Image (cartoon, rainbow, N blue to C red):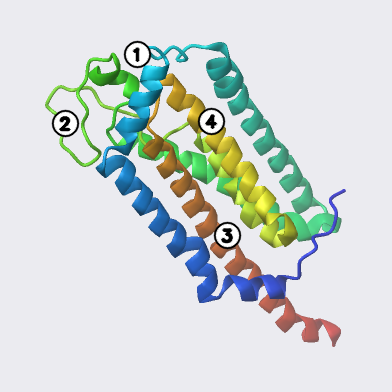
């Protein structure tokens, strides 16, 4: 049985609808993302970091096929994220079938959708953008020259499918726990955010050590997952607000 949420929807709704909420959750993160992205992608920060990692590994991607990066973090990490998503689906299904857990229906449905849509959108963007992994580049032992995100690729050059970072989305999608906690237990929202940032950060760093991604790739994975989580949260709150308004209108009629 799920415990009762500890937040009143009316107070949560009021906080969500303020300009301060949008400043803190939309505009400030967007500004930070653009600033850091300009440093990494525009000022050479990506290459500087990758150069140092490549040098530390002996001028080759020594950790590309290491056990702890490929099996422990990449494979087992993906399984752990999938298991957590499956658990969320099971709990969500239970909540929508049980009146005693009705208060958890929208929060759990939100969490399931946010994780699925976050990882799904990152995967879609990977198929549409056209950037190479570091290990594909001649600078790091590969065969291709670096082509920027908005730069045209030479005819016949194979497509790149490395932007944004796919594996880190299995961790960063869980930043949605921040908004999930706002719905059910606001005091835990920072723990939820920390869990998503830690998981995505570990997954992303592992891939960078393997030569699979630049840091900016994972930055935009985080930005994508955060945007999906925020947008879906605002949508769910609007739906919940409509349901509560309908219930208030219907209540007098039921009493008579």
| Residue appearing at x 23%, y 15% in the figure | 143
Compute the Cα span from label 4 to label 2: 29 Å
- Find numbered disc 1 in the image and state the secondary structure of the residue it sits on: loop
Image location of residue 88, percent across then percent down: 70, 42
Tell whether label 3 touches label 2 (CB within 8 Å). no
Q: Earlier in the sequence, mark 3 or mark 1?
A: 1
Image location of residue 216, percent across then percent down: 37, 39
Question: What residue sits right under mark 3 in the picture?
Answer: 233
Q: How many other residues sit within 10 Å of disc 2, few (<14), some (14-19) or many (≥20)?
A: some
- Find numbered disc 2 in the image and state the secondary structure of the residue it sits on: loop
- Dividing the picture into quadrants, the one containing residue 99 is bottom right
| Residue appearing at x 41%, y 44% in the figure | 220
Tell whether label 2 touches label 4 (CB within 8 Å). no
Q: Nearer the viewer, residue 135 or 256?
A: 135
- Dividing the picture into quadrants, the one containing residue 181 is bottom right
Compute the Cα span from label 3 to label 1: 45 Å
Image location of residue 252, percent across then percent down: 79, 86
Compute the Cα span from label 4 to label 1: 22 Å
Q: Earlier in the sequence, mark 2 or mark 3?
A: 2
Q: How many other residues sit within 10 Å of disc 4, few (<14), some (14-19) or many (≥20)?
A: many
- Dividing the picture into quadrants, the one containing residue 135 is top left
Q: How many other residues sit within 10 Å of disc 3, few (<14), some (14-19) or many (≥20)?
A: many
Question: What residue sits right under mark 2 in the picture?
Answer: 153
Q: Earlier in the sequence, mark 4 or mark 1?
A: 1
Report the quarter where the C terminus lies.
bottom right
| Residue appearing at x 32%, y 45% in the figure | 39
Question: What residue sits right under mark 1 in the picture?
Answer: 59
- Residue 146 in the figure: left or right of residue 256: left
Image location of residue 115, percent across then percent down: 57, 44
């Amino acid at each position: 049985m799920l415990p009762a949420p500890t937040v009143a929807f009316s107070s949560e709704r009021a906080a969500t609808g303020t300009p301060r909420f949008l400043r803190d959750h939309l505009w400030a993160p967007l500004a930070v993302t653009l600033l850091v992205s300009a440093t990494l992608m525009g000022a050479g920060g990506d290459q500087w970091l990758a150069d140092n990692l490549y040098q530390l590994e002996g001028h080759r991607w020594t950790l590309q096929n290491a056990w702890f990066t490929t099996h422990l973090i990449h494979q087992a990490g993906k399984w752990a994220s999938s298991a957590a998503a499956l658990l969320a689906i099971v709990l969500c299904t239970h909540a929508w079938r049980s009146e005693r857990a009705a208060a958890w229906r929208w929060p759990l449905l939100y969490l399931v959708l946010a994780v699925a849509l976050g990882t799904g959108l990152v995967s879609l963007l990977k198929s549409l953008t056209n950037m190479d992994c570091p290990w594909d580049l001649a600078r790091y032992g590969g065969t291709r020259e670096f082509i920027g995100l908005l730069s045209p690729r030479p005819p016949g050059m194979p497509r790149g499918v490395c932007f944004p970072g796919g594996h880190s989305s299995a961790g960063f999608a869980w930043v949605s726990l921040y908004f999930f906690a706002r719905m059910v237990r606001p005091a835990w929202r920072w723990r939820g955010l920390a869990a998503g940032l830690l998981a995505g950060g570990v997954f992303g760093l592992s891939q960078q050590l393997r030569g699979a991604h630049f840091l900016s790739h994972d930055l935009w994975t985080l930005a994508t997952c955060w945007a999906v989580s925020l947008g879906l949260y605002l949508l769910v709150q609007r739906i919940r607000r409509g349901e509560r308004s309908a219930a208030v209108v219907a209540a007098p009629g039921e009493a008579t």
